[in-house]
Amino acid sequence: MSPLAPGCGSLRSALLPLMVLLLQLGLSRGLYFHIGETEKRCFIEEIPDETMVIGNYKTQLWDKQAETFLPSTPGLGMHVEVKDPDGKAILSRQYGSEGRFIFTSHTPGEHQICLHSNSTRMSLFAGGKLRVHLDIQIGEHTNNYPEIAANDKLTELQLRVRQLLDQVEQIQKEQNYQRYREERFRLTSESTNQRVLWWSIAQTLILILTGIWQMRHLKSFFEAKKLV
């Protein structure tokens, strides 16, 4: 093995924290958005089957005097509705101004998560702005490993093995979901190709029948005019 060039060790040491930071950012699904009183916001999440999803949210109202967002009043809450890929509602519940919703997917595919305010009092929306902070965790990211280690009395090595097993299980679910998507895409492609084939055959038959009809029509026309 060839020796490292001068400065490579320091370069790797400098890049390692950056890579860890990028990895953590990639796993983060936190966001915030603004909605009105009757407005609904929906998000699409591609989720494998038998996967737990946890969503944490909190709401803030715009304060005109302070010109900033402040914690919402207890009377203001959110209605959360989750639909599976078939359009079936698997969660529809009223929550407070800050809460958590949990559901488990039973069908792989795109799940629709919708939130809207349950308030009908315009005074709560005097500033016209409602900010919602939303954090969605999927799969092994829903596990609270410090709590698991405390409850099961796991050592650091045992906890790390538990995390790796959960990650492997989630990777397997993702692979199964990708195979499911590939199978659906293949079936759609075959169905489309078959429809194109039958449409081409139908067009050919229509052209042939039109040509036959035109020849017979011209023949009868010439016979009627005694040209043949």
Image (spheres, rainbow, N blue to C red):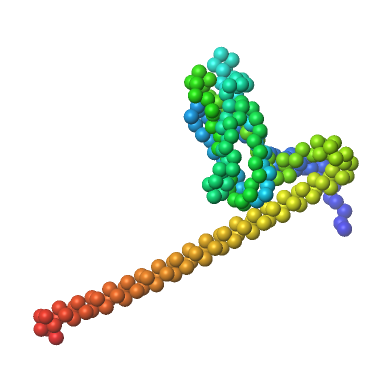
Counting labels gives 0
Q: Is residue 110 left or right of residue 210?
A: right
Image-based side of 3 in relation to 99, left or right: right
On the image, the x and y values in percent for residue 36 come to 50, 28
Residue 114: quadrant of the picture: top right
Residue 73 locus on image (x, y percent)? 60, 20
Foreground pick, 87 / 132: 87
Foreground pick, 209 / 103: 103
| Residue under the image location 87 percent in, 45 percent down | 158
Question: Looking at the picture, does residue 77 appear above or below residue 183?
Answer: above
Q: Is residue 40 left or right of residue 45?
A: left
Q: Position of residue 4 (x, y in %)?
A: 85, 51
Give the farthest residue toward the bottom: 228
Q: Is residue 29 visible?
A: no
Snapshot quadrant of residue 216: bottom left
Which residue is pictured at 40% across the width and 68% down the height? 199
Quarter of the image that includes the C terminus: bottom left
Q: Residue at x 65, y 41 (%)?
A: 103
Residue drawn 56% across and 34% down?
Answer: 115
State the quadrant of the N terminus.
bottom right
Left or right: residue 137 compared with residue 130: right
In the current view of this chain or complex, which residue is farthest to the top? 65
Residue 203, position in %: x, y?
Answer: 36, 70
Instruction: Work out whether residue 68 can be spotted.
Output: yes
